[in-house]
Amino acid sequence: MSKEKIQMSEALADIMPPEYQELVATATFGNEDRSWKDIGTSKELIEQHSLCAGCPESIAFRFILASIPAPEDSVFVGSTGCTSLVFPHVGVQNIHSLFGNQNAIASGLHRALKLRFPDVHKDVIVLAGDGATVDIGLDMTMQSWFRQEKFTTICFDNELYANTGGQESGLMQKGFVAKMAPTGKKFEKVRLPEIAFESGCHYVACLTVSKPNRVEKAIRNAIYVSREFGPTYVQLYTPCILEIGKQSMEGLDEMKDAETIGGRFVMKEFMTDEVKVFLKEKDAEQKARKKAAKEAVAVTA
């Protein structure tokens, strides 16, 4: 979905919705250095959403969509859950899968796109909640890692089933009491980031979405690494403020508390030695590209 593909016919331009006209005029398609800083100045790839007011998932969606390096050549695979309420509003190709089989769908999709577009890399990105990723879909999640499928899996970790009443999930913290888990969780939070790395993921990151620069870095790293090496995994804490008894403006505070020293979401990354070298090279390339762009602007000014 490059800018060339979304251009409007002149004969129809006057009847096209203003949101689409703005998307064509100011979206960041084709800009390799697009970032979260473009939010507010360029047309966002998420026009609106139907999530609850103040939901951290809505923040995460915006940061992720602003961070993917090539939205015009990307396809999201979602699953049943709160995330499925947002994808109809997203300006990137996406598929809604059944609950838990999103990594199986992504595996077939990535292979098909490789055959259909052999000369263009298509980024396949799975985005699902903790129920779909860790509980119901754990087998298909891990099997895609075992097979070394080259796509990124992103988990919105609500630490419970957020849109079906507050049931316990494997990622819920021990002792937490929810509306449909009245006696509290009996065992520790599943250590999926560590499991992902041990299961063959070449890059793994676990963090909150309170800091957009960190989210952007993790998402871009994961996608770049998946293109070259194999599966990658990013776990983002997106608490359901309604289910944990918070007000609409308290989601950010909840995430910040979870990432303080000793908190369960202090940012952590795992990567292979080859990936460390690769990411250093990517950082150097990006810095050189930005420096050249600044110098070009200075010359024309």
Image (cartoon, rainbow, N blue to C red):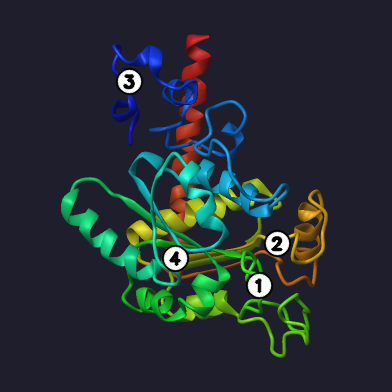
The dot on residue 8 is 3
Circle 2 — which element?
loop
Circle 3 — which element?
loop
The dot on residue 83 is none
Q: Residue at label 1? A: 160
The answer to whether any part of residue 70 appears in the image is no
4 or 2: tag closer to the N-terminus: 4
Horizontal and vertical percent for residue 56? 68, 53
The residue drawn where x is 49% and y is 76% is 196
Q: CA distance from mark 2 to mark 3?
A: 39 Å
Q: Quadrant of residue 29?
A: top left
User: What amino acid is found at the position of numbered circle 1 in the picture?
Assistant: Leu
User: What amino acid is found at the position of numbered circle 3 in the picture?
Assistant: Met
Quadrant placement of the N terminus: top left
- Give the crowd class for mark 2: few <14, some 14-19, many >=20 residues within 10 Å: many
Q: Nearer the viewer, residue 288 or 149?
A: 149
**Exactly how many numbered labels are in the figure?**
4
Horizontal and vertical percent for residue 20? 44, 25
Position above or below: 272 against 49: below
Circle 4 — which element?
strand
The dot on residue 240 is 2
| In this picture, residue 68 sits left or right of residue 9 | right
1 or 3: tag closer to the N-terminus: 3
1 or 2: tag closer to the N-terminus: 1
User: What amino acid is found at the position of numbered circle 4 in the picture?
Assistant: Thr
| In this picture, residue 221 sits left or right of residue 235 | left
2 or 3: tag closer to the N-terminus: 3
